[in-house]
Amino acid sequence: MKTPLKISLTFFLMLIIVNANAQQTAKQIKAQEKAASIKHKIDNQKYIFIAQYAQPLRGTQKYLTSEYDLHVKKDSVIAYLPYFGRAYMDVPYNSTDEGIKFTSTKFDYKIVEKKKGGWSITIVLHDVRRTQKLLLDVFANGSATLQATSNSRDAISFQGYIKDDDK
């Protein structure tokens, strides 16, 4: 009587282990596909960074309720991002000239692959007055952080993600 019970218990445990391994493999495959998709977009310089949080140099993190983004293409970089922080000179007095809003066609684009996965992207802008450099750290799961630096304002960071659809 004990032998059939041991055999069925062993069989049941093996079935659970095999099922758990299959689920883990499916998750790993999905994560690898997402990482490959993100890598393809970065290599082709065709992606959109969606900002969800802003972190000014001085102050607290702010949740962004509107959609702010950074479009990166081979021939242009288009930014529509808010700015919270201190400006030192060349302060705009016009209310329509706020934030980090520009279209650049003259820029340097450099990708460095991280050791533990992900990419560091440096975009140096040559034809934008206020913003000089964008540093974008992208992780394999699609989350990203963006830091914008300027001569005349405090730096600001954004947390968000790389949009994963091709629409």
Image (spheres, grey):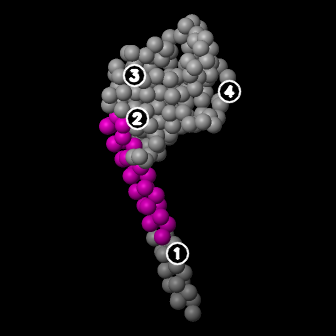
User: Which residue is nearer to you in this view: 93 or 7?
Assistant: 93
- Residue under label 1: 13
Magenta part mainly helix, strand or loop?
helix
- Residue under label 2: 119
Q: Earlier in the sequence, mark 1 or mark 2?
A: 1
Q: Which of marks 2 and 4 is nearer the N terminus?
A: 4
Q: Give the range drawn in magenta.
A: 19-46
- Of tags 2 and 4, the one toward the viewer is 4
Circle 4 crowding by C-alpha within 10 Å: few under 14, some 14–19, many from 20: few
Q: Does the magenta stretch include residue 26?
A: yes
- Residue under label 4: 60
Say above or below: 14 vs 154: below
- Of tags 3 and 4, the one toward the viewer is 3
Q: Which amino acid does label 3 sit on?
A: Ser
Q: Please tell me which residue is depicted at 56% across the width and 18% down the height of the picture.
A: 97
Q: Does the magenta stretch include residue 117?
A: no
Circle 1 crowding by C-alpha within 10 Å: few under 14, some 14–19, many from 20: few
Q: Which amino acid does label 4 sit on?
A: Thr
Q: Earlier in the sequence, mark 3 or mark 2?
A: 3
Q: Is mark 2 on a helix, strand or loop?
A: strand
**C-beta proximity under 8 Å, tags 1 and 2:** no
- Of tags 3 and 2, the one toward the viewer is 3
Location of residue 102 in the rendering, given as x and y in whole percent from the top left corner: 46, 22
Cα gap from disc 3 to disc 4, whole angstroms: 29 Å
Outermost residue, bottom direction? 1
- Residue under label 3: 104
Q: What element carries label 4?
A: loop
Number of dots carrying numbers: 4
Location of residue 124 in the rendering, given as x and y in whole percent from the top left corner: 39, 20
Say above or below: 77 vs 15: above
Q: Which of marks 3 and 4 is nearer the N terminus?
A: 4
Location of residue 20 in the rendering, given as x and y in whole percent from the top left corner: 49, 66
